[in-house]
Image: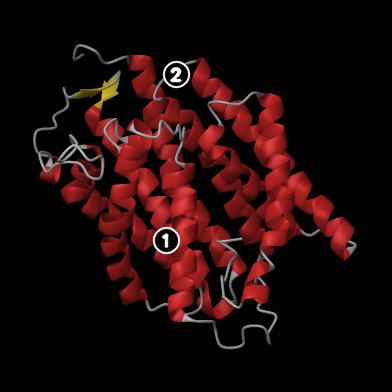
Amino acid sequence: MPTGIDTGDTAWLLASTALVLLMTPGLALFYGGMVRTKSVLNMIMMSFASIAVVTVVWLLAGYTLAFGPDMGGWGLLGGLQHLGMRGITPTSVTGHVPTLLFAAFQLTFAVITVALISGAIADRARFGAWVAFTAVWTLLVYVPVAHWVFSPGGWILHRLGALDFAGGTVVEVNCGASGLALALLLGPRLGFRKEAMRPHNLPLVLLGAGLLWFGWFGFNGGSALGANGLAAAALMNTQAAGCTGLLGWLMVEKRRDGHATTLGAASGAVAGLVAITPSCGSVDILGALLIGLAAGVVCSYAVSWKYRLGYDDSLDVVG
């Protein structure tokens, strides 16, 4: 065993990496159930293609640009020392875990961030164009933001002192803003505002939401990078916020529409999980419950913004 590697921390991060990777197939089911029948396979394949494309990009250049030693001292981008994972061996250590494992864990974050964007442009993106977009966006958008927030030399972490525990900025804010930009660029779907475009398979949506929830324990708990009390706190806060997010969304639906919905339950849970991500290692249980509740309430109203403002966020990624 190389000096500095903790077996317990390594075991937990191995499990967390697998959990976060599982979130992307879960997202494929979540999105696949929300679109119309004709778009199911394309929607699912957009998520699975993200796994393959982002992995190759990350191993060739993404990891070193995100987590390599800061280039130029500005906190904007990492150096090129580890192109193709050069110089990183099974004995390399980051914190108390193998560097290869840390790189794999961070890779799963990059994968799901790109996949999340696809929901904003469902029903109107060619598969080939999506594959090209995935590679370019990962390098030009995700990688720099990951360096800013996660790398010790990044300007948001180092200069502003902002603590984003598990990637609320890098993943959720990043993909939400990019999804909005892409939706505006591509324009609305044919029939937007005129056709209902209801989800074709709600059981599939719930199955996908359940897998996302399950994977989120690795997403947030694994970000402690150790099998310790901080990981336990992040895990418990994640559960608390997911539950109150679900309940908050259903309360709004009951008050506004007269009845709660299955889609609302799935959406509320995801909203709560998203909201707690950046602070899951910083707040107590009461804070997590309140954050989840606020997310469920606010986001249930936010999904209607696309009709007021005229942008077509197909599966409510922005909202």
- Expressed as whole percent of the image width and height from the top left, the position of residue 66 reads 25, 43
Quadrant assignment, res 21: top left
Q: Which is nearer the eye, 312 or 15? A: 312
| Relative horizontal placement of residue 174, taking residue 155 as reference (left or right) | right
Q: Give SS at disc 2.
A: loop
Residue at mark 1: 47
What residue sits 26% from the left and 33% below the top?
A: 153
Q: Give SS at disc 1.
A: helix
Kind of residue at disc 2: Ala
Residue 227's label in the rendered image is: 2
1 or 2: tag closer to the N-terminus: 1
Q: How far is the residue under mark 1 from the one under mark 2?
A: 30 Å
- Expressed as whole percent of the image width and height from the top left, the position of residue 105 reads 35, 37
| Relative horizontal placement of residue 293, taking residue 260 as reference (left or right) | left
Dividing the image into 4 quarters, which one contains the C terminus?
bottom right
Quadrant assignment, res 292: top right
- Expressed as whole percent of the image width and height from the top left, the position of residue 243 reads 71, 39
Kind of residue at disc 1: Ser
